[in-house]
């Protein structure tokens, strides 16, 4: 398995807060299916402490699997993000014991 960092930035047309509020229950239920794969995750906050995107580290077979997972997330089906970046990730600092050695 490989690790991938997913960075999502909300759309900037003023609709993000409404979309997030309406789809949050479905998003959480969807993400529950991936509890074993998502090593960490949560909202990215703006200077006022409001969600403006998201960050996850996901363990997956390959990047295509991560892209499918993100694309089917209710947040993305509803059009929440203006930008989604996915990169391979190497966990170095405070690396969990269950990951293989570097």
Image (cartoon, grey):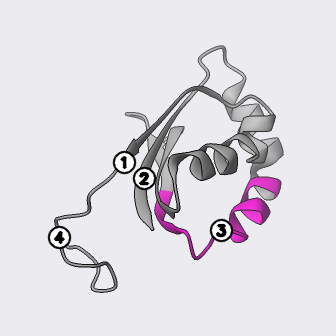
| Disc 2: which residue | 4
Mark on residue 97? Answer: none
| Disc 3: which residue | 34
Q: Is residue 91 above or below residue 95?
A: above
Q: Position of residue 77 (x, y in %)?
A: 80, 36
Mark 4 neighbour class, 10 Å CA radius: few under 14, some 14 to 19, many 20 or more: few
Mark 1 neighbour class, 10 Å CA radius: few under 14, some 14 to 19, many 20 or more: some
Of residue 5 and residue 82, the one placed in the foreground of this image is: 5
Determine whether the residue tagged by mark 3 lies in a helix, strand or loop: loop
Q: Are the residues at dot 1 and dot 2 in contact (C-beta closer than 8 Å)?
A: yes
Provide the residue span drawn in magenta.
Answer: 26-41
| Disc 1: which residue | 88
Q: Position of residue 88 (x, y in %)?
A: 36, 48
- Residue 20 location, quadrant: top right
- Residue at the image point whose x is 65% and y is 68% from the top: 34
Q: Earlier in the sequence, mark 4 or mark 1?
A: 1
Q: CA distance from mark 4 to mark 3?
A: 25 Å
């Amino acid at each position: 398995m490989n690790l991938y960092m997913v960075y999502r930035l909300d759309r900037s047309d003023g609709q993000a807060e409404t979309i997030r509020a309406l789809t949050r229950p479905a998003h959480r239920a969807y993400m529950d299916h991936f509890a074993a794969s998502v090593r960490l995750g949560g909202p990215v906050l703006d200077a006022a402490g409001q969600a403006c995107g998201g960050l996850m580290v996901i363990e997956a077979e390959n990047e295509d699997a991560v892209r499918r997972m993100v694309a089917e997330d209710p947040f993305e089906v509803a059009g929440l993000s203006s930008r989604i970046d996915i990169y391979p990730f190497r966990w170095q600092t405070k690396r969990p014991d269950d990951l293989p050695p570097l």
